[in-house]
Image: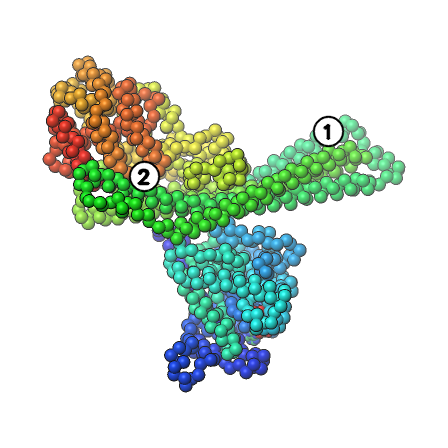
Amino acid sequence: MKDHKEKYSFHQFTVALRVRPINASELDEDASIVAHKLGEQMMVLMDPTECPVDLHKGNRSREKTFIFDVVLDTETSQEDVYESTTKDLIDGVISGYNATVFAYGPTGVGKTYTMLGTDCEPGIYIRTLNDLFKAIEETTDSMDYTVSMSYLEIYNEIVRDLLNPSSRVLELREDSKGAIQITGITECSTSNADEIMELLRKGNKLRTQEPTGANKTSSRSHAVLQVTVRKKTRVNNIHRGTFSGKLFMIDLAGSERASQTQNRGKRMKEGAHINRSLLALGNCITALSERGGNRNHHVNFRDSKLTRLLKDSLGGNSRTVMIAHISPASTSFEESRATLIYACRAKNIKTRVKKNLQNVSYHIAQYTSIISELHEEIERLKEIVRQQEREQKIKIPNILNIQERQQETGSSFWSEEMVNLRDQLVGAFKEQMEMRRSLMQLENTNIELHVDTSRHLITIADWEQDKARQDSKCQHESKSLKLSGEIMMDIGDEESEVDSPEPQEVIVAREELNMLLTEQKKTAILKAELLKRLAETKCKASQLEQLLPRQGSSEDQQEVLKLLCRVHELEVGNTELQAKALCKDNLLCQKDFVILHYQQRRALREQIIQEQRGLIEEYNLHVPSDLEKLYQLYSKDLEERTLNRLQQLHSILPSTITNDSWSDCSGLISERSILHFGMEPHQKPSSNSRTSVSSRARFDLPPIVFESDSDSYSSTSSPASAQSRQNTNLSPTCFHPLKTPRQQNLHYPSPKEAVQNVLSPNSLDSEHRRILSFPQLIKEAEDIVSGTKNISLVAARRRSRVPVPESSLFTANTNGPMLHHMLENMNTKDAPSVSLWLSRMKKATSVERFSPEFRAKADFWMSVQPKSKNQLVDKRALKIKYRDRRSRSYDAIPAEFLKTKAQSVQRPNADSKTHSKATPNNGPSETLMKPRFSHTVSSIITICKATASSETEHQEDTLQIQKVKVTPQITAQWDNTVRNKILLLSKRV
Ligand SMILES: Nc1ncnc2c1ncn2[C@@H]1O[C@H](COP(=O)(O)OP(=O)(O)OP(=O)(O)O)[C@@H](O)[C@H]1O
């Protein structure tokens, strides 16, 4: 939580108001001034229709006072406007924060004047850029800066590149972190303010501006100038990071009334688009101002390109300044009033800003992959050239002679036919590259859509899980009440059936999911088309390549053309590399998302533990000693910040990841993104909505596993079973960063295996050591791993606390009279319970330790298995116990495991059979769940027996089996007593 606070800081949306001087046309209309500035922050807007002496109307006065962060009136200079609104943002942008300043208001009120200004009175754009470069120059000794800019306009809902008018229509895409990206936009890198000004002037000439009835120089589009500043420290070390801050400066088109502008045809259509997008902006401002601190409150940014583009500026990671503009004229009262109301609402918006830092390790991983692939390619090409040379030497001793001969015959070096062929070839390659780039973008979009989909699916799945848990809890409670005879009239049934309404967050997730799925279908169609075209072009290119050597009139000509092909092949290869890097980028982002999710969950768990601890301390509740020990270990672990160190370790790992690991992972992602969401009809989508994220998380995240149950209670198991455990459970199936799971022939580890892996100090295999490459890191990882193992050991003991005394009972006195006494007193009704209990006993110790007499008795009881109603009692007790165990706070077992556990619990007969027939030494074929099941059964039996005879309720941890004298009478009483006791126990625990 602390990290979270340090990472983000909340920032209030700053709202400034500028009032332009009344203009000639307004004066011509006999307009009066209705907007008056009062003090530094107050603006009074008087209703022009209001008569000062009309008292009745006065009661309904629309005169209103508005307060803003700063109010700039007609006297305020351009310099003052800049200084009071934008200047402060510059330092933040240089330090890696995003910032936005935008001009808002109706048409002709001075938005372009504020942002762009005139040659004599430059506006915010130019002043900001000047100051930005000045600030950069001051720190260039210690820092490396790169400044780039892009300039676009949104005209009639179409995004156009103002720096490259010939480019196609630009698309807005959301990246995996939810930030908006403009695909294909020209980003010009500049080193000084003059260059950037030149670009700006060039862009402004292309901006759509037309005279209207309201403004001679009306902007018909929203213009967005984006300046990105990347800063790197000059010190070279692993912690070196790149800060990138983005500054958006936006001049919006103004809202307009058709009557005021007298627009017709094209102008009217433009006006409609402008109004629609501004309406969407107004809606977003309203929704954002209403949501306050609740970040789950839905805000629809998708209504227009403008709001999508402004998503981060309005409610995300940006310091934002809105400069609202109004005219002071009475003729513009309605527009001014509406603008002031929206501007006032915007004051309630809070953005959450954080520094944009990209760690150097991330870049290293990117570049190493590119460089190593390029090296390979160069080596391959060199080999081809060498081979060609060898062939040439054999065939033609002297190329020069041929050339001379050619010149003698008067044939030109490049015949027309050859030039044609070469052009066709180059064209085919260019086409191929273009298609690959488009495919790459599509793939990127696909991944983004996939990530978004996963995010929404998780939201829905979380809610459904919670709901299911609540429902089953209600059902269990009502069943338990019925069982214990404490049925209260008509209670519960109705309550449990009451459906809780879906929260807004889930409704939004469902809506967005539908949209995303439609988009995925679209991209799938596009991708299929593109792939088909690409295959055709590839085929064409290879045919041309085949043709070339035969067409060539001389060997050197052929060679040159072959090299030309190779150069283009390299370019194609390069594009592929870019695509892979892009996939890698997305994979990391996705991984971050999974980690974030886990961190949130961890924070929640820690909060629960702390609060429960608080309750224990407050009410001085009794805590069993082993639970107390566990808590102490947990606190120690917290103090040592083990998890944080693991996270640090994790953050270093990407820097050492080489390219190989990603080339196939990218395929994995794209393939999955296709498979999971119905892009390939022959592949069925995952039934579990969370599969994609969770399964990836299973091999991406450091594996975490607990110990084998059998280990925790059986120290004398056979070598065969030990071998089996080693084979099945103890061998680490860690994620191999250099290979994909498929290459490694790995199966996705089950949660149990996953947990086991990390807890084993052996889990750091040689590959990990090589990757960690720093000795202290290996040491640290081992320390952490063994430290965590201690917790698991205690946890395992905690789980098997009942069998331990049983086992020691045998060890201490194998042929003790107590055991014989117990066996003597058993009734056939007890057979199932006793046989289970005995099989459990046998597992807890070596059979050889039993006396032959005891073994004979035990075998007899094991063979007696009538299906008595006591089995049902056990079954019920099991279910309750199972639920009871789950409800404990130390239940850190993953959901899938619990599911398996629940399934095994639902098959008590099958399991009990297995146990009754099982060899004393827990055989290697026995599943991992069975010992746990038998353990649960025996624990339940022991507790049942003990509670039936014990007077005190708080002694279940120290129960002595000697106290139990099982008689038919007691057995008969079990049905009622056991149920009641278990209920009491489950409530207390
Ligand atoms: N503060 C000011 N001082 C002097 N002149 C101003 C001021 N504000 C605006 N003007 C003048 O008003 C006219 C309209 O301004 P401008 O084009 O900037 O409006 P706009 O809000 O951008 O309009 P649109 O939304 O139609 O593009 C221009 O001629 C501009 O020079």
Q: Position of residue 350 (x, y in %)?
A: 41, 61
Quadrant of residue 394 within the rendered picture? top right
Q: In the image, is residue 708 above or below residue 346?
A: above
Q: Is residue 773 visible?
A: no
Q: In the image, is residue 920 above or below residue 30?
A: above
Q: Amino acid at mark 1?
A: Arg
Q: In the image, is residue 192 above or below residue 412?
A: below
Secondary structure beneath dot 2 equals loop
Q: In the image, is residue 33 above or below residue 554?
A: below
Residue nearest the observer in this picture, 330 or 788? 330
Disc 1 residue crowd, few under 14, some 14–19, many 20+, Cα 10 Å: few
Please say if the residues under marks 1 and 2 sit with CB atoms less than 8 Å apart.
Answer: no
Point 26% across, 27% down: residue: 934
Q: Position of residue 960 (x, y in %)?
A: 14, 29
C-alpha span from label 1 to label 2: 67 Å
Q: Amino acid at mark 2?
A: Ala
Q: Which residue is mark 1?
A: 390
Q: Nearer the viewer, mark 1 or mark 2?
A: 2
Point 81% across, 35% down: residue: 553
Horizontally, is 785 left or right of 166 in the view? Answer: left
Q: Which residue ends up furthest to the bottom in the rendered image? A: 53
Q: Position of residue 916 (x, y in %)?
A: 26, 20
Q: Which residue is mark 2?
A: 892
Disc 2 residue crowd, few under 14, some 14–19, many 20+, Cα 10 Å: few
Horizontally, is 317 left or right of 564 in the view? Answer: left
Can you say which quadrant of the picture contains the C terminus?
Answer: top left
Q: Position of residue 533 (x, y in %)?
A: 65, 40
